[in-house]
Image (cartoon, rainbow, N blue to C red):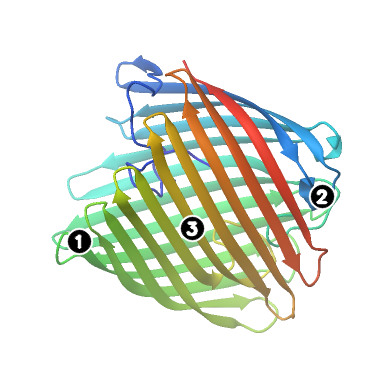
Amino acid sequence: MLPNGIPGFNSTPEVTILTRQHPQYDSPGIRWGAWEIDPELTAGTGYDSNPNGIASPSATLNLGPSLLVQNTALGIGAYAAAQSQNYLQSPLQNSNSNTLALGEALLLPHNTLVLALARLQTQETGFALASISTLRPTTITGTEFRASDKYTTGMVTLTPEFTYATAVTASPANLTATNIGGGLTLTFTPDAITSLVMRLHASNWRFSKLGQNANDGTALIGLSNDAERLWSFRLLGGIATRLPAIGKSQTVPVIEAAFAWMPSELTSLDFSAAHEIEDPERLDATSYTLTESKLSLAHELRRNIILTAAASATQADYFHSPLTETILSNAETITWRLNRQFKFVTAYTFNDRQANHLRAANEHVVTLTITWAP
């Protein structure tokens, strides 16, 4: 949800097929000394065959301004965005969302101190795990603060991390969740390519509904490898434990895997898989074991035309019950940069939900958007 340039929230390499610079097509934005100011305005239309998994087919209209401000010399990045999504034949599904984020990366002789803060308001539909079957999207307002200090000496890198996050889910859930977590990652790199990675993490969950509080702990060890951006992989394994305030504790094996490959300068392939307790990006009171995999492909057909395809499968196996839920998704997009100011994006998305406690549902979504940047 956040672009590159926000310290503390970036998780992708600096240069990919999607982020590679093309001066003849990239917007110059606004320059003020060392500051880079990049406003954008996106408008689009499309069709959704089954909004929220329960509504009638509808044409869609969306409008979204955004602003990215960066100062690489100071290590500062800030982002603000808003999005209005309207369903002409199903107005009950209309939604509005907004995002604010600020990050600072302070480069010191042996370490990098990162502070980041984000606040977002989003709408969750029936095609999200552990969502509540409702007649309209559910509003979730979240705030997250992150702090980390990456210290490097010789072949060893030590990174302590701290996170404080809150999420307020509106009616019908009416739930407030708070998560306080901390972790320590040790990376040993005897050469310039392969690293031994060890990670410990613990978190405390507090909910507005009594009896749902819990403590989590995770221990992982594995390898990561980066062959000069031609290909890279990461494979970590370990255990995770959840200690609820009420009920039995749960201990499950944890696996995190990722693989990236660029067979040519114009094509990239990325794959990731995980088996863990819940989704670390979500704050909810429902406890489950999460198994997910994602595959994406990007190809630069021309300097101004990029094709992408992505597929994902996510399954939740809920604790203390026989309930299961599976979400399948795939998306294909074509991005066409007309010039430095305008780009077109056409996309097709398919979502499918299968569960033994909810009605099965799927949707086909087609969109056409145009983005303007000065």
- Say which of marks 1 and 2 sits in front: 1
Q: CA distance from mark 1 to mark 2?
A: 49 Å
Q: Of 244 and 187, which appears nearest the observer? A: 187
Residue 46 visible within the image: yes
> Splitting the image into 4 quarters, where does residue 16 fall?
top left
Query: Residue 297: x percent and y percent?
Result: 45, 50
Secondary structure beneath disc 3? strand
- Other residues around mark 1 within 10 Å, as few (<14) / some (14–19) / many (≥20): few
In the visual, does 95 lie left or right of 103? right
Residue to which mark 2 is pinned: 171
Q: Residue at x 44, y 32 (%)?
A: 305
Residue to which mark 1 is pinned: 193
Name the residue type under label 3.
Leu
> Splitting the image into 4 quarters, where does residue 107 fall?
top left
Q: Of 283 and 345, which appears nearest the observer? A: 345
Name the residue type under label 1.
Ile
Q: Say which label, 3 or 1, has the lower sequence index.
A: 1
Q: CA distance from mark 3 to mark 1?
A: 24 Å
Name the residue type under label 2.
Ser
Secondary structure beneath disc 1? loop
Query: Residue 90: x percent and y percent?
Result: 85, 37
Which residue reaches farthest bottom? 248
Query: Residue 295 — which label?
Result: 3
In the visual, does 214 lie left or right of 58? left
Where the N terminus falls, by quadrant?
top right
